[in-house]
Image (tube, rainbow, N blue to C red):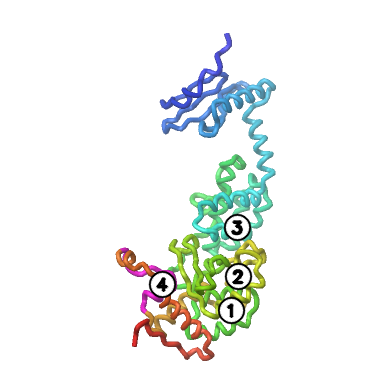
Amino acid sequence: MPRAVDKLNARSVATTTAPGRYGDGGGLYLQVDSSGTKRWLLIFRSQGRQREMGLGGLASVSLADARRRRDEARRLLAEGRDPIDARRSVGTRRSAAVTFGAFADQLIPELSKGFRNEKHAAQWTSTLATYAGPLRSKPIAEITTEDVLMALRPIWTEKAETASRVRGRIERVLDAAKAQGLREGENPARWRGHLDHLLPKRRRLTRGHHAAVPFVEMPAFVADLRQRTGVAALALEFLILTAARSGEVRGATWAEIDTRNRLWIIPAERMKAGREHRVPLVARVAEILETVTPLRRGDLIFPSFRADRPLSDMAFSALLTRMGCAATAHGFRSSFRDWAGEATVTPREVAEAALAHAVGDAVELAYRRGDALEKRRGLMDAWAAFLATSAAGNVVPLRPAGAA
């Protein structure tokens, strides 16, 4: 007498919670794990041995879908084919057609929905394109440990922090590919218990200040910078005059500029502290904006060669190298702060506000709602005037507002 099939129904599937296997017939079972997770399982015999094949979780595969998958597997068995081998063959052909680069390009927009700002997505794209370039054309199913090592070894000791981020991003791409059935086995980019045995241990980063130009040398540096041409030079001068971070400048858009009030309003999602930051714009910044206006090709003020992408984080480094300067772009914030602290009488909280730093404990911050904008406007005007002096020793004194 044939065994009954379709013994389960939608209600029983939804309400059953006790761990165990519940048969629907034809080898199809609802597996309820001790954690409460429900998934479909097909048990069958092929070539004289019993086999089990997962058909997906209840969250994504309904009872009707599971029955269709069971029936398709039974059809293959009737033809003398093993359903597991057939599925693996289809998956292999599919994964062989998907390259690492194509999969990463599709994955990054999805991952970026969880990023704090657009800068992270741009960094993912640029670092994988630059440092994982040899992997892009390879089928994602065939990426090996040696492939990953070939990408990482050239930068592992010279650019340790970048290399670590690249490794983590490669690992995440490969994990996502496995989750979508495009790969099998261990992740070749995994660090602990794998690459940590094949690559030298990274030197611990020395915590300290970014390399900076001494503030007394800044007028000469800016004079040299103004002899340079190109978007990167203008963007770097914009950064110096606003004391902003590299990412804030490279991601700046025209919509953030308030010409009437001479302000650059950086939205909270682009700020490190997650708070909106208003930057007073000096006359020279207005000139820079006028200079780049005829080159406008999109929303970005300082785009790369592609209008929809900001300057690379390497643009400033390359420019500084050409100028023979060992400082970093971030170091100019230190130059500004040293100048404000040593060559002016600016109150500490005003100088720190210019850098978008929070000063004081939680209670003090709760009562201090303003951002000292007008005091900072005077400070930035004095900074611009100092940078324009021909002699580095001519500092511009600045008294706090209301001082005699």
- The Cα–Cα distance between marks 1 and 4, rounded to whole angstroms, is 24 Å
Q: Are marks 4 and 2 in contact (CB under 8 Å)?
A: no
Q: Find residue 315 and name its label.
A: 2
Of mark 1 and mark 4, the one earlier in the sequence is 1
Q: Is residue 31 above or below residue 136?
A: above
Q: CA distance from mark 2 to mark 1?
A: 21 Å
The kind of residue on which mark 1 rests is: Glu
Q: Quadrant of the C terminus?
A: bottom left
Q: Nearer the viewer, residue 95 or 294?
A: 294
- Mark 3 = which residue? 125
- The residue sitting at the top extreme is 1
Q: CA distance from mark 2 to mark 3?
A: 15 Å
Is residue 294 shown left or right of residue 208? right
Q: Is residue 19 left or right of residue 90?
A: left
Which residue is pictured at 59% across the width and 60% down the height?
127
Secondary structure under badge 1? Answer: helix
* Element class at badge 3: helix
Residue pointed to by mark 1? 287
Count residues near mark 1 (Cα–Cα under 10 Å), then give few for <14, some for 14-19, many for 20+: few
- Which quarter of the rendered picture does the N terminus lie within? top right
Q: CA distance from mark 4 to mark 2?
A: 27 Å
Q: Which residues are magenta?
A: 347-362
User: Percent x, y for residue 220?
Assistant: 55, 86
Question: Which badge, 1 or 3, is on the more N-terminal residue?
Answer: 3
Marks 1,3: beta carbons within 8 A: no
Q: Amino acid at mark 3?
A: Thr
Position of 30 compared to 87: left or right?
left
Question: Residue at point 39% right, 75% down?
Answer: 350
Can you identify the residue that label 4 sits on?
A: 353
Residue type pointed to by label 4: Ala
Q: Is residue 79 visible?
A: yes
